[in-house]
Image: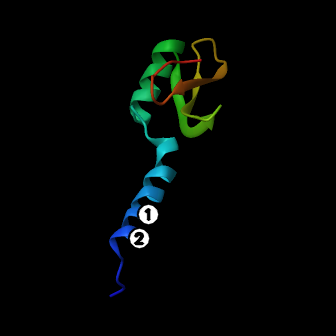
Amino acid sequence: MPYLSVSRLALVLTLTLALAQPFAHAMDRDEAAARAQQASGGRVLAVDRAEQDGRPVFRVRVLTPSGEVRVIVVDARTGATR
């Protein structure tokens, strides 16, 4: 079994947390879908994670009541929709 010193273990943990930070979400896919559905009044077709302007977001594709497909961007930390 390989030996990890405390300093190497701390480095590995720090790097792991740093890489995970962009997708540290305050909400999950289901919550993002619900926000987009409320904002559009439509039916959710798909939810994808992405990054926009350095912030984690969900891109939610919805079918509006008028039959139009729209993409609603939901901020993963705040829940704000665009």
Q: Secondary structure at mark 1?
A: helix
Residue 47: % across, % down: 53, 36
Q: Residue furthest front?
A: 7
Q: Quadrant of the C terminus?
A: top right
* Left or right of residue 42: residue 11: left
Identify the residue at horizontal 45%, vertical 29% (top origin): 77
Identify the residue at horizontal 45%, vertical 23% (top origin): 78
Q: Quadrant of the N terminus?
A: bottom left
Residue 11: % across, % down: 44, 63
Instruction: Look at mark 2 in the image and give the residue it sits on.
Output: 8
Marks counted in the figure total 2
* Left or right of residue 20: residue 4: left
| Local crowd size for mark 1, using a 10 Å CA cut-off: few (<14), some (14–19), many (≥20) | few
- Image coloring type: rainbow
| Residue 11 - label | 1
| Local crowd size for mark 2, using a 10 Å CA cut-off: few (<14), some (14–19), many (≥20) | few
Dot 2 and dot 1 residues touching (CB under 8 Å): yes
Q: The disc labelled 2 sits on which kind of residue? A: Arg
| Residue 68 - label | none
Identify the residue at horizontal 39%, vertical 28% (top origin): 31
Q: The disc labelled 1 sits on which kind of residue? A: Leu
Residue 44: % across, % down: 51, 27
Identify the residue at horizontal 34%, vertical 83% (top origin): 3
Q: In this view of the protein, which residue sits in the foreground, 37 or 19? A: 19
Mark pair 2, 1: CA separation: 5 Å
Residue 80: % across, % down: 50, 18
Q: Secondary structure at mark 2?
A: helix
| Residue 14, quarter of the rendered image | bottom left
Q: Residue furthest bottom?
A: 1
Judge whether 24 appears above or below 37 on screen: below
Q: In this view of the protein, which residue sits in the foreground, 34 or 54? A: 54
